[in-house]
Amino acid sequence: MTTPPPLAITGVTGTVGSQVAGILAEAGFPLRLLARTPANAPELPGAVVLPCDYGDRALCERSLEGAETLFMVSGRENEDRLGEHKAFIDAAQAAGVRQIVYTSFMGAAPDAVFTLARDHFHTEEHIKAAGIDYTFLRDNIYLDFLEPFGGPEGIIRGPADEGRVSAVAQADVARSAAAILEDPRAHAQTAYTLTGPEALTLTEAATIIAKARNRPFRFQNETVPEAYESRKKWPAPQWQYDAWVSTYTAIAAGQLAGVTDDVERLTGRRALSLAELLAG
């Protein structure tokens, strides 16, 4: 049996992972595509599709055997995502993976205001402890999500106050990751913070969206108790409510306001602004 390609890509049925795979396949790289549902993986030239579920260590170890570089898109949000991440990293270590390129989060820290950024910090630490070379892409909130945050009524609600966020386009994250994966050794033991070119308040973002879509769109600030109450219309576990609300309190705290040029340094192109993204 022929060994699958040494470059493994996860998240291939999602936006970022599929875009990374597409860029690399177009550049002629043979790929090992890992998916929970292999039938949903994109059909790309030179690609081999294998099953992978982060929580199933034995399955992942088999699918990673012979892989040298692994692009690890953070797993779907759930109460045990950190445990699944650790199991997957352990599988990569056992399979002999040399380097993991991981999609982390801006300001990942054990005490980050955004609760899910804490999971990203502990995932980074587990990769380091495994002795595997790493590259961390610490993405800000996705710029693509700001308009959907407003829902059908066009109102973004949350306790962000006048805090700023330097949200980054998913396409820029994908292009940055692909640039690293073309020569991963040149980026070993490095962390990049991927942001857009500007830090906007949600009031400013809503104004840009309203102009681009030619329809009413606004930001409505909430207190923290109001934010928890308004989200009760969506049944969810407590950790999910905490994550939703802390997205906004992290903005209010200034933890998502920094702007870097890492996207441009990696890709040679300035990161997309919100207006440019909305213009297509």
Image: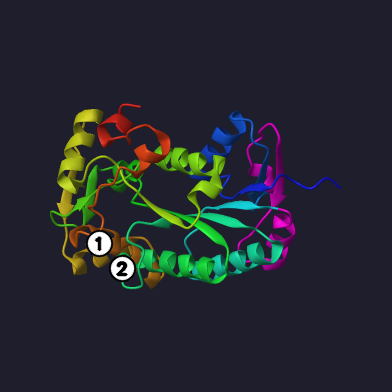
Residue located farthest toward the front when viewing the structure as drawn: 186
Residue 230's disc number: none
Compared to 250, does 147 lie above or below?
Answer: above
* Residue numbers of the magenta segment: 38-66
Q: Tell me the residue at 66%/34% (across/down).
A: 43
Mark 1, residues whose alpha carbon is within 10 Å: few (<14), some, or many (≥20)? Answer: many
Residue 159: percent from left, percent from top: 19, 60
Whether residue 94 sits left or right of residue 130 in the image: it is right
Residue 104: percent from left, percent from top: 43, 57
Type of amino acid under label 2: Ala
- Is 278 colored magenta in this rendering? no
Residue located farthest toward the right when viewing the structure as drawn: 1
Q: CA distance from mark 1 to mark 2?
A: 8 Å
Task: Say which residue label 1 marks.
Answer: 250
Residue 82: percent from left, percent from top: 50, 69
Residue 56 seen by the camera: no
Q: Give the quadrant of the C terminus.
A: top left
- Is 58 colored magenta in this rendering? yes
Examine the image and state in which quarter residue 267 appears. top left
Q: Secondary structure at mark 1?
A: helix
Residues at badges 1 and 2 in contact (C-beta under 8 Å)? yes
Type of amino acid under label 1: Ala
Residue 112's disc number: 2
